[in-house]
Image: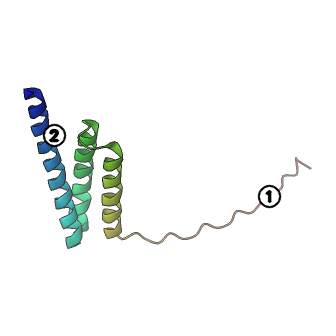
Amino acid sequence: MDGIREARERNRAQRSRLRTAIKSLRSVVAAGDAAKAAELLPQTLGIIDKIAQKKVIHANTASRYKSRLSKKVAALVPVAPVAPAKPRRRTTSKAAV
């Protein structure tokens, strides 16, 4: 039974580390600091991946966290508008005729 207790404590510590990282990233996003959010995002995603790999959280849950956090950080960073692509002209080759 000691192994189970140790694993439980280890999992609780990992989950707490995850929650702290997510909260800190969310607070930076709420403050609107795009540079700090862009810096924290890879670290937070790495923590999420490691904890999912150890099966502390389900893989789909990790994917959902990563997706939602990435969207929030991407919404902070202004994106330059992209000009629409010009339509390509079709040319016929004389060799085919």
Q: Position of residue 64 (x, y in %)?
A: 35, 53
Q: Quadrant of the N terminus?
A: top left
Mark 1, Cα crowd under 10 Å, few <14 / some 14-19 / many 20+, is few
Q: Position of residue 9 (x, y in %)?
A: 9, 39
Residue furthest left as drawn: 2
Which SS class for mark 1?
Answer: loop
In the picture, measured across the screen, residue 6 lies left or right of residue 19, that is left
Q: Nearer the viewer, mark 2 or mark 1?
A: 2
Q: Is residue 2 above or below residue 34?
A: above
CA separation in Å, label 2 and label 1: 63 Å
The residue at 23%/62% (across/down) is 37
The quadrant in which residue 77 appears is bottom left
Q: Is residue 6 above or below residue 95?
A: above
* Residues at discs 2 and 1 in contact (Cβ within 8 Å): no
Residue to which mark 1 is pinned: 91
Residue to which mark 2 is pinned: 11
In the picture, measured across the screen, residue 86 lies left or right of residue 41, that is right
The residue at 17%/47% (across/down) is 15
Q: Position of residue 33 (x, y in %)?
A: 22, 69
Q: Is residue 52 above or below residue 90?
A: above
The quadrant in which residue 20 appears is bottom left
The residue at 43%/71% (across/down) is 80
Q: How many callouts does the rendering have?
A: 2
Q: Name the residue nearer the viewer: 90 or 1.
A: 1
If you read the primary sequence from the N terminus, does the residue marked by circle 2 or circle 1 appear first? Answer: 2
Q: Name the residue nearer the viewer: 14 or 6.
A: 6
Which SS class for mark 2?
Answer: helix
